[in-house]
Image (cartoon, grey):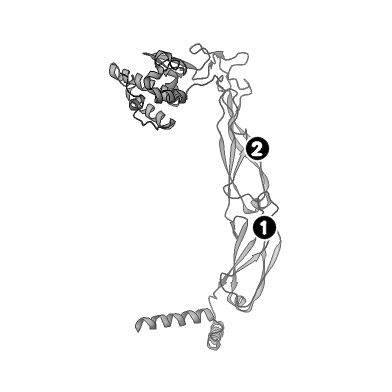
Amino acid sequence: MKADYYETLGVGKSADEKELKSAFRKLAMQFHPDKNPGDANAEHKFKEIGEAYETLKDPQKRAAYDRFGHAAFENGGMGGGGFGGGGSGGFADIFEDIFGEMMGGGRQRRSGGRERGADLRYNMEITLEEAYAGKTAQIHVPTSITCDECSGSGAKPGTQPVTCGTCSGSGRVRAAQGFFSIERTCPTCHGRGQIIKDPCPKCSGQGRITEERALSVNIPAGIEDGTRIRLTGEGEAGLRGGPSGDLYIFLSLKPHEFFQRDGADLYCKVPISMTTAALGGQFEVATLDGTQTRVKIPEGTQNAKQFRLKGKGMPVLRQPAMGDLYIQIAIETPQNLNKKQRELLEEFERVSSQDNSPQSTGFFSRMKDFFEGLSE
């Protein structure tokens, strides 16, 4: 009496396609004849799990099995649901579908050895000014290009690649193992389906040579740090006339002496004297558009106060909008005082009132009340 298919695979009747495939993969690897040479029980078990999976993976066969059991496939009931029967192509196809990627990627069509070239990476560092205005940069990239001697075929001029005799041009070979066969990449042509008897002397049969190329890269205004620019088809040339890969330009911005960037906004810390902060004043700052902008400082300006210059930041990438420039005030405490300066500051301190320094006066007053409250 045949064992229940669900029990054979070790899954419940509600198992979905993913669970069925996972269970089959695990058991097939465990009882594979290559791992159990000469073990008749393992070979029988291997055949049982293949039969169970072939039935349950097909929705129609599974529905019939759930309703009638094994009787659904007896006397021609479903057109042959047995191991290697009609309808699904047999166990070899199932095994290849599940384990194809472990054996060279499954079935492949002959490509004549034409393989896509690798993608390349180029790191480029630009200044904040260049990111602001945009630029066209010239770069030199060492890369593989199509061999001009053989036009990428890899064969000596006047000759052509020939069909591989081992696989007859399919790129795959079958190896029989017992009652099933496994398809593998052809060891002679490595899956290309063709071999080169007379390789091109310039590229040694590769169809490409290494050369440094000069390329023009457009850097749009407002580009941000870490942006990747893709140049399609400018990567490594494909093997034996295959398509070229892509070139990726990775941009980074050099640190700026005055400005820090946050998106489209710029920040600039400007030191001013204590007297300018107290009495008020003005100064001019240079902006990335090449102009000078005047900033007015009201009297009593505190440290870290920010002033916004609208539209003086970075361009927004591929938009007409502009970011803003924020001027952050850093009040500088006087140093290296002479006798006269010290006397003047001491006199100022004597005549100062709480209204002149409300924050510090209020802070120490609150702190005093706090500690007095702790001692009570």
Residue 117's spot in the image, x, y percent?
56, 29
- Which amino acid, by three-letter code, is at mark 2? Leu
Q: Residue at x 38, y 23 (%)?
A: 52
- Disc on res. 288: 1
Asked if one can make out residue 104 in the rendered structure from this viewpoint, the answer is no
- 177 sits to left or right of 136: left
Q: Is residue 162 above or below residue 239?
A: above
**Helix, strand, or loop for circle 2?**
strand
Give 162 or 318, whichever is nearer the viewer. 318
Mark 1 closeness class: few <14, some 14–19, many ≥20 residues within 10 Å: some
Mark 2 closeness class: few <14, some 14–19, many ≥20 residues within 10 Å: few
- 61 sits to left or right of 163: left
Give 125 or 59, whichever is nearer the viewer. 59
Q: Residue at x 38, y 82 (%)?
A: 373
- Which amino acid, by three-letter code, is at mark 1? Leu
Residue 144's spot in the image, x, y percent?
58, 30
- 217 sits to left or right of 88: right
Q: Quadrant of the C terminus?
A: bottom left
Give the residue number, with chain letter if any, for mark 2: 215
Report if the CB atoms under discs 2 and 1 are less than 8 Å apart.
no
**Helix, strand, or loop for circle 1?**
loop
